[in-house]
Image (tube, grey):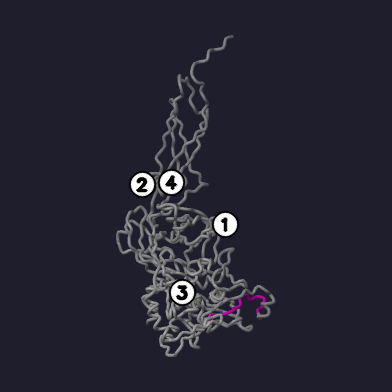
Amino acid sequence: MEEPKRKRGRKPKKPVTGTMDFQLTNPNTASPASDDALFTVTGTLEIPETDLPTGRRKRGRPSKSPITSKSPIPSKKPENGVLVNPPLRRSSRSVLNNGDSELVISERLNSENPLKIVPSMDAVVKVFCVHTEPNFSLPWQRKRQYSSSSSGFVIGGRRVLTNAHSVEHYTQVKLKKRGSDSKYLATVLAIGTECDIALLTVSDDEFWEGVSPVEFGPLPALQDAVTVVGYPIGGDTISVTSGVVSRMEILSYVHGSTELLGLQIDAAINSGNSGGPAFNDKGKCVGIAFQSLKHEDVENIGYVIPTPVIKHFIDDFEKSGEYTGFPNLGVEWQKMENPDLRKAMGMSLDQKGVRIRRIEPTAPESQFLKPSDIILSFDGIDIANDGTIPFRHGERIGFSYLVSQKFTGENAVVRVLRKSKILSFNIKLATHKRLIPAHIKGKPPSYYIIAGFVFTAISVPYLRSEYGKDYEYDAPVKLLDKHLHAMAQSKDEQLVVVSQVLAADINIGYEDIVNTQVLAFNGKPVKNLKGLASMVETCNDEFLRFDLEYQQIVVLRTASAKAATRDILTTNCIPSAMSDDLKT
């Protein structure tokens, strides 16, 4: 029997699985490239063959089935400035027309992939600062000014937070809002060098229009998601990087040379991110980006100032009208993990604590505590033999966290073990006084000049200026030893050195003296720079004798030295023989 002839045209295909892409965007946004929420929902349409109508096909390519869907549900923007995506369960009806039949398909978002809450970025601002740093080599003048840019964000009370190092030695500070072409002059209200936070404000009312302040959230847990927003290097527009909290402990704050609570995250923090907020997945601020670890063996390690430190800074300013700093216990301590050591110190099996090695003579604690005392608890919280306290579930942290939570001038109850007796002291806490201060708080450096000898007081910025960022390796050993271990015996004590010798006929043979400590003048010990200047200016002896370290001495005739000073100042264009703070 002859087979029936095949009709012309392409062989019909069976229906296959199809895909629909839904692009949901904020209806108020001009383009999908906006910084607001943008996500894609992909659904698979299973079209069973039995549900499709059968019938004679027409010649040519089969017609496509039109697909229609309802418009996406618009995003909502609550009053707190957080953009909330549509609910997790959404049903969109799609209709397929094929001949006289109709197929209705329901599409539902996967609940296993929850939609993210994107924080409002309008509160994040770009900070422009003009800096004029002091010149420690030539302390009577300043260096050439330079500009920098960083990030900040608006908080309540018409204020802006940023990093302290972003506005250090500022001459002018300006702020620029997201999407604006105007820069607004800002006023610096407070600078917390230890915690690396600065507080700004803007007097122009136009700056605050349409800006909702950022709200602070709780301290995040490990593996919590964080989003860092700011204006880092590489572009002019706002940037967003995300990661998780990977560590939480007492960190070294590089700018303030202090140790406070900090968060380690794996989100990228680059130059320009400083001062920008870090948000959690609910759009709340959980910290301020401030430093990162750059090393060939590590990647993506950034650090964030957590909310307890931020709130301490803000509360401190609101209470006293200025920044007073973080208090310090003023002691150096030793772990008591060795059982023989604990027994020798008279500790029972159930007692734990740390041993006091040294006490700062200028600290209030020196009136109550003694070396070899065992600190058992601070404000009722027991301290372990390794110096830690319970922090959260499964976590421990150094007990210095308890001290840093206090304010300057507040009291704390310290319980110690002394010669097998338990004693309790109510101690008033104060800030730490260092022989070599970690910063000069924006003030110009002090100096005094006589016969070409430039005397100044040592500070960490001075060491960094003289020996670079690796000053801890390159500075003279004796200066480093005093920097790391020496303690001030009085609150006004300073480490005075001969910074350099300006060449002149009167100081021939002394030109190579550089950064050498001055121990005494005419047999009297040198306590600070102001005291040295006063002794030299009022000296009526025939000679000026300076005793330096390494058993060096400098001897100058008094009348000749004072006369030569005027010529040296004129030659080197120096306006005065001493800084303004020494004249009062």
Work out how far the residue at label 4 is from the one at label 1, CA to CA, in angstroms. Answer: 36 Å
The reply to whether discs 3 and 2 touch (Cβ–Cβ < 8 Å) is no
For mark 2, does the 10 Å Cα neighbourhood hold few (<14), some (14 to 19), or many (20 or more) residues? few
Q: Is residue 580 visible?
A: no
Query: Could you tell me how many numbered marks the image carries?
Result: 4
Chain-order first, disc 4 or disc 1: 4
Q: Residue furthest top?
A: 1
Q: Residue furthest right?
A: 340
What numbered label is drawn on residue 296?
1
Closest to the camera, between mark 4 and mark 1, is 1
Q: Which three-letter amino acid code belongs to the residue tagged 3?
A: Phe
Q: Nearer the viewer, residue 222 or 104?
A: 222
What numbered label is drawn on residue 550?
none
Work out how far the residue at label 3 is from the one at label 1, CA to CA, in angstroms. Answer: 39 Å
Residue 235 lies, in percent from the top left, at 42, 52
Q: Which three-letter amino acid code belongs to the residue tagged 1?
A: Glu
Secondary structure type for disc 3? loop
Chain-order first, disc 2 or disc 4: 2
Image quadrant occupied by the C terminus? bottom left
Which residue corresponds to mark 2? 28
Which residue corresponds to mark 4? 38
